[in-house]
Amino acid sequence: MSPKVAFITGGNGITGSAILEHLVKKTDSTEWSKIIVTSRSPFQAAVEDDRITFVPLDYTQEVQTLIDAMLPACSGVTHAFFSSYIHRDGFEALNVANHGLFKNFLDSLLEVAPNLECCLLQTGGKHYNVHLGPVPSPAREEEPRRDSPIGNFYYQQEDYLFEKQQGATWRWNVVRPEAIIGATPKPNGMNEALTIAFYFIVCKEMGIEAKMPSNKRYWDGHDDASDARLVADLSIWASTHPHAGNQAFNVTNGDYFSWRYMEPRLAAYFGASASSEQTFATPHPTEGGPCLDLSLSQWSQDKRQVWERICHRANLPEASSTWDAGTWAFQDWVFQRTWCATLSMNKAREFGWTGYMDSYKSFTDAFKQLEKQGVLPKSN
Ligand SMILES: NC(=O)c1ccc[n+]([C@@H]2O[C@H](COP(=O)([O-])OP(=O)(O)OC[C@H]3O[C@@H](n4cnc5c(N)ncnc54)[C@H](OP(=O)(O)O)[C@@H]3O)[C@@H](O)[C@H]2O)c1
């Protein structure tokens, strides 16, 4: 069998960089001979490999402009992974910003890659509207779509993928993670591990309890998360196993946890204190509406000086600016929910994928990686 050629979009992002890292660390040139990476801004590679070619692309540009930039580097592409994303803090603005991005990607790809075998689109839990209100949990891939008045850009992306694949020889996959836990080479749109790390470190510095910035219903309930390395693993697996072709798969760590017990463990990693006996302002919020005892967006506004002091003392002056990489409003989206919204992993398992990850380890591995990158001071 001839070696495969990967095309990864969103190469500076939390997913694209993890897919790249997976291919570099776990495969060789007999399996994957070339890895083409694209991102909008200059490449900030976390890994090195002779197989990597970087092509900067902005998917808001005309398709012909993209085609011109992709030729000839991309003509041998066999497997494409779409992880480009424009973050906006408002859900309506998010739909508008991402409209057209995937269409331009696919239109240009199909013009330049005649040997395409699989095109994988990454979406996420928002497919099930987990961000908008209570939905059946754990959500299963086969559930009918839940339309909302504000729409959902993932449905447009999927529909375009399905439409273009009709009658073609290549396969499609859709991969749907929950909050992705990992470290990015540059600031990105949604980064739970980084954001809560800032919170714990600053609370410790201020000598205050790191109370869970959420509500009692969410804190008491159950949740899940998706390690970026697992998202990469499932993406490569699905795209290279023809029996898993033309299928959507959820991808999470495979365990469910309660923030009531997870949050104090994560706080302890940084030497901050948090309690599983925390009291909340609203003891039992009604299911469905948003509720936050503490908004991280607001909380973060006057903590920059504390962060700078920590970085200065840790001899990490360049980390001072990373405060702006905290994805505060995204974290408020997640923690304001008064419902549990998890994803089922049964389908991928039935198809033969065996990946899993302990979620505590997932968080602490990301913290360690961020420390290694000099984004966070060493915790001990
Ligand atoms: N992060 C999470 O916690 C999470 C959770 C569930 C689902 N998801 C979903 O996963 C998918 C990928 O998101 P992500 O979090 O991996 O993204 P991300 O880390 O924010 O990275 C986004 C990537 O898209 C690139 N990009 C932005 N605008 C672009 C444009 N106009 N043209 C080309 N590339 C552009 C960025 O390029 P530059 O950085 O180079 O500018 C970056 O490489 C999205 O559908 C997202 O909703 C993410």
Image (spheres, rainbow, N blue to C red):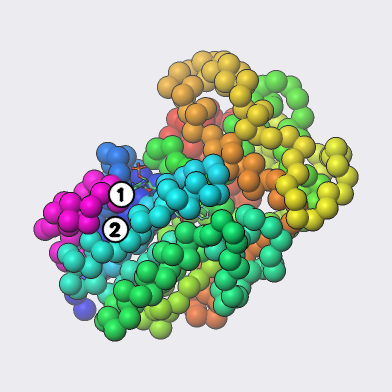
Q: Amino acid at mark 1?
A: Thr
Q: Tag 1: Cα neighbours inside 10 Å, few (<14), some, or many (≥20)?
A: some
Whether pointer 1 and pointer 2 mark residues with C-beta atoms closer than 8 Å, the reply is yes
Q: Which residues are magenta?
A: 52-77
Residue shown at the point (40%, 55%) measured from the top left: 99
The answer to whether 19 is drawn above or below residue 343 in the figure is above
Asked if one can make out residue 234 in the rendered structure from this viewpoint, the answer is no
Q: Secondary structure at mark 2?
A: helix
How many dots with numbers? 2
Q: In the image, 263: left or right of 360?
A: right
Q: Is the residue marked 1 within 8 Å of ligand 1, measured from its CB?
A: yes
Q: Quadrant of the C terminus?
A: top right
On the image, which quarter does residue 304 sit in? top right
Q: Amino acid at mark 2?
A: Asn
Q: CA distance from mark 1 to mark 2?
A: 7 Å
Residue shown at the point (65%, 34%) measured from the top left: 296
Residue shown at the point (45%, 77%) measured from the top left: 247
On the image, which quarter does residue 89 sit in? top right
Q: Nearer the viewer, residue 294 or 350?
A: 294
- Considering only order in the chain, which callout, 2 or 1, is on the residue closer to the N terminus? 1
Q: In the image, 298: left or right of 258?
A: left
Residue 86 screen position, x and y as percent: 42, 47
Residue 161 screen position, x and y as percent: 37, 70
Q: Which mark is residue 104?
A: 2
State the residue lying farthest toward the left: 72
Kindly identify which residue carries mark 1.
60
Q: Nearer the viewer, residue 31 or 349?
A: 349
